[in-house]
């Protein structure tokens, strides 16, 4: 239950999605609604992109 609440709070505050087996501290996915320009501003260190539509970043604090 706490993991669900943490995931919802991350999504609301940082515009990221959590994978199905996500644990606190794992990498997260930038939601598609965030443009690349916005993502560059929020995550200046960049992201991993195994597919063009998936942008993986470390969990924001």
Image (cartoon, rainbow, N blue to C red):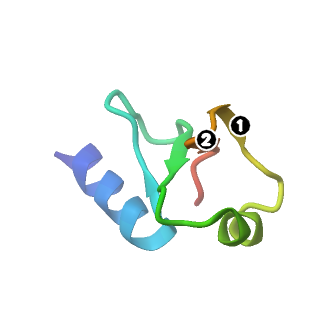
Q: In the structure shown, which secondary structural element does the residue marked by tag 1 occupy? A: strand
* Disc 2 element: strand
What residue is pinned by disc 2? 56
In the displayed structure, does residue 31 sit left or right of residue 55? left
Label disc, if present, on residue 48 of the rendered structure: 1
Q: Is residue 14 above or below residue 22?
A: below
The structure residue drawn at horizontal position 39% and vertical position 62%, both measured from the top left corner, is 11
Looking at this rendering, what residue extends furthest in the right direction?
45
Q: Earlier in the sequence, mark 1 or mark 2?
A: 1
Picture layout, residue 6 above or below residue 15: above
Q: Position of residue 53 (x, y in %)?
A: 55, 42
Residue 29, horizontal then vertical, whole percent: 52, 45
Residue at image position (59%, 57%) is: 60
The residue nearer to you, when weighing 53 against 28, is: 53
Kindly indicate the quadrant of the structure image that contains residue 18. top left
Name the quadrant of the C terminus.
Answer: bottom right
């Amino acid at each position: 239950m706490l993991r669900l609440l943490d995931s919802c709070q991350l999504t609301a505050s940082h515009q990221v999605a959590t994978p199905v087996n996500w644990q606190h501290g794992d990498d997260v996915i930038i939601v598609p609604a965030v443009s690349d320009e916005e993502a560059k501003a929020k995550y200046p260190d960049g992201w991993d992109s195994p597919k063009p539509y998936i942008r993986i970043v470390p969990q924001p604090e």
